[in-house]
Image: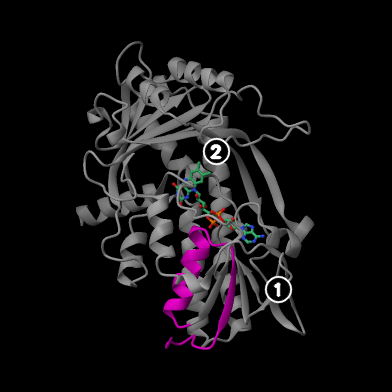
């Protein structure tokens, strides 16, 4: 392939959404990429929906990194609700100016995956070691094979083995103290009599130990009524039975694996704190799941000619809706730095780290700040006026794209 990076060999560890985003951006500039993915099977069922800043998808379309049939939808505003007796949708306490684009995880993954030819995407390739010394950057596989490259990109996710090998004790990892319950189902499954009450703004419920969002988002194929997906996330609340390991760590429970007691616990929680129509959304969900929330910080995103991108670098809280965004922007910044430096790997790696490390660490801090405000130390939502909520929120969410973009749009509108 022609392009400014022609001749540059890049080995990418991990072929999920960010590994494929990196492969897409680097190959578009002419690099010769090989993606090494441990899993034998296709990954498309991994996630539900992603919230993204409004700027991201248009910029990916403009750069031809996604195709024009890519499915996404802008969500207008966010309604803050509290339970109010039997009132079906509770009481609206504030409609927050808010812009967020929604895409299905599967669509974003597939959008990038389609750009990587099967001959460059090696399934069933487990990486066991990475190195960069006098012999050059290289990756060792469980099969014994060694893959040599000019640059190694680690996109091996939140439990990154590459991060651990490079930085070990230098990695700061901490449990936030709370979990996210989440679930999704297709509108066409007909589990709800109607989804009319979920149209328009995102619905967010504030309760005593946290908050929750329910929204109607595109499926991987379509954003048209009848073919969308209903998705919800609950951040915080008391811990359910049976999720602690012997050493006190909290385990995640994948879709379909909640015990009968855990499910009953979830249903009791939503009956207690959700308006009835939103509690129903959770209770009809066939396969809810649960994920403990961790923060991960690294001392650097690079060691020699090995770089970290996406969750392999820092891990940010889901409440920021930023993990995938951060990873895609890491991938773009890396490709841009390589192009800018004319393929000088050492210079590009230094530029990449200098540009992205402060941003990626800043997002971890933002997630912690939002976690305190929206889970650990929530206000007494029902007693707040819209004005009080607005002031409080401006503090809690300053620096977050969903509120900053809305503020920019309203400034432009006033001008
Ligand atoms: C509840 C929840 C909600 C979220 N909501 C949002 C949101 O609204 N917006 C947003 O932007 N982000 C969101 N995120 C975050 C987002 O989902 C992640 O940041 C993103 O999926 C990370 O992608 P990744 O490719 O870096 O890692 P992963 O998807 O974890 O992929 C890592 C890949 O590496 C492979 N791998 C691992 N080890 C090896 C090895 N040794 N050899 C070879 N391959 C290996 C794995 O098999 C896997 O395919 C959310 C996350 C959660 C938990």
Q: Judging from the image, what secondary structure is the residue with disc 2 in? A: helix
Residue 100 position, x and y percent, is 34, 48
Report if residue 189 is visible in the image.
yes
Q: Judging from the image, what secondary structure is the residue with disc 1 in? A: loop
**Which quadrant would the N terminus be assigned to in this image?**
bottom left
- The residue nearer to you, when weighing 89 against 394, is 89
**Which residue corresponds to the image point at 36% horizontal and 21% vertical from the top-left?**
280
Q: Residues within 10 Å of mark 1 (few under 14, many from 20)?
A: few
Residue 232 position, x and y percent, is 41, 34
Which of the 4 quarters of the picture holds residue 282?
top left
Q: Above or below — where is 394 with respect to 35?
A: above
Magenta highlight range: 1-30
Which mark is first along the chain, 1 or 2?
1
- How far apart are the alpha carbons under marks 2 and 1? 43 Å
**Which residue corresponds to the image point at 51% horizontal and 22% vertical from the top-left?**
266
Residue 381 position, x and y percent, is 43, 24
- Mark 1 sits on what residue? 145
**Which residue corresponds to the image point at 29% horizontal and 44% vertical from the top-left?**
75
- Mark 2 sits on what residue? 371
Check the image and tell me how it is coloured.
one colour
**Which quadrant would the C terminus be assigned to in this image?**
bottom left
């Amino acid at each position: 392939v022609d392009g400014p990076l022609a001749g540059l060999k890049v080995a990418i560890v991990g072929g999920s959404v960010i590994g494929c985003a990196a492969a897409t951006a680097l190959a578009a500039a002419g690099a010769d990429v090989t993606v090494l993915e441990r899993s034998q099977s296709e990954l498309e069922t991994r996630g539900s929906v992603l919230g993204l800043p409004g700027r991201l998808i248009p910029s990916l379309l403009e750069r031809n990194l996604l195709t024009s049939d890519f499915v996404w939808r802008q969500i207008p505003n966010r309604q803050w609700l509290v339970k109010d007796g039997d009132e079906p949708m509770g009481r609206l306490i504030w409609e927050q100016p808010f812009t967020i684009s929604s895409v299905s995880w599967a669509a974003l993954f597939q959008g990038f995956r389609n750009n990587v030819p099967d001959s460059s995407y090696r399934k069933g390739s487990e990486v066991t070691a990475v190195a960069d010394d006098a012999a050059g950057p290289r990756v060792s596989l469980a099969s014994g094979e060694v893959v040599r490259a000019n640059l190694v990109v680690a996109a091996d996710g939140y439990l990154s083995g590459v991060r651990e090998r490079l930085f070990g004790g230098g990695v700061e990892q901490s449990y936030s103290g709370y979990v996210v319950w989440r679930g999704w189902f297709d509108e066409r499954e007909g589990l709800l009599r109607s989804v009319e009450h979920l149209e328009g703004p995102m619905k967010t419920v504030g309760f005593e130990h946290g908050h929750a969002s329910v929204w109607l988002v595109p499926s991987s194929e379509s954003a048209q009524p009848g073919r969308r997906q209903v998705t919800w996330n609950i951040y915080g609340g008391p811990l359910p039975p049976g999720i602690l390991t012997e050493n006190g760590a909290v385990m995640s429970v994948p879709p379909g694996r909640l015990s009968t007691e855990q499910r009953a616990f979830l249903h009791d929680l939503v009956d207690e704190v959700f308006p009835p129509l939103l509690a129903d959304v959770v209770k009809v969900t066939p396969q809810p799941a649960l994920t403990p929330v961790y923060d991960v910080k690294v001392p650097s995103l690079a060691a020699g000619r090995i770089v970290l991108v996406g969750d392999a670098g820092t891990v940010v809280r889901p409440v920021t809706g930023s993990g995938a965004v951060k990873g895609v922007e890491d991938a773009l910044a890396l490709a841009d730095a390589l192009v800018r430096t004319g393929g000088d790997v050492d210079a590009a790696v230094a530029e990449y780290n200098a540009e992205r490390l402060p941003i990626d660490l800043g997002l971890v801090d933002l997630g912690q700040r939002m976690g305190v405000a929206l889970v650990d130390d929530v206000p007494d939502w029902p007693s707040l006026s819209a004005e009080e909520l607005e002031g409080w929120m401006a503090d809690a969410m300053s620096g977050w794209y969903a509120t900053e973009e809305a503020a920019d749009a309203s400034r432009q509108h006033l001008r």
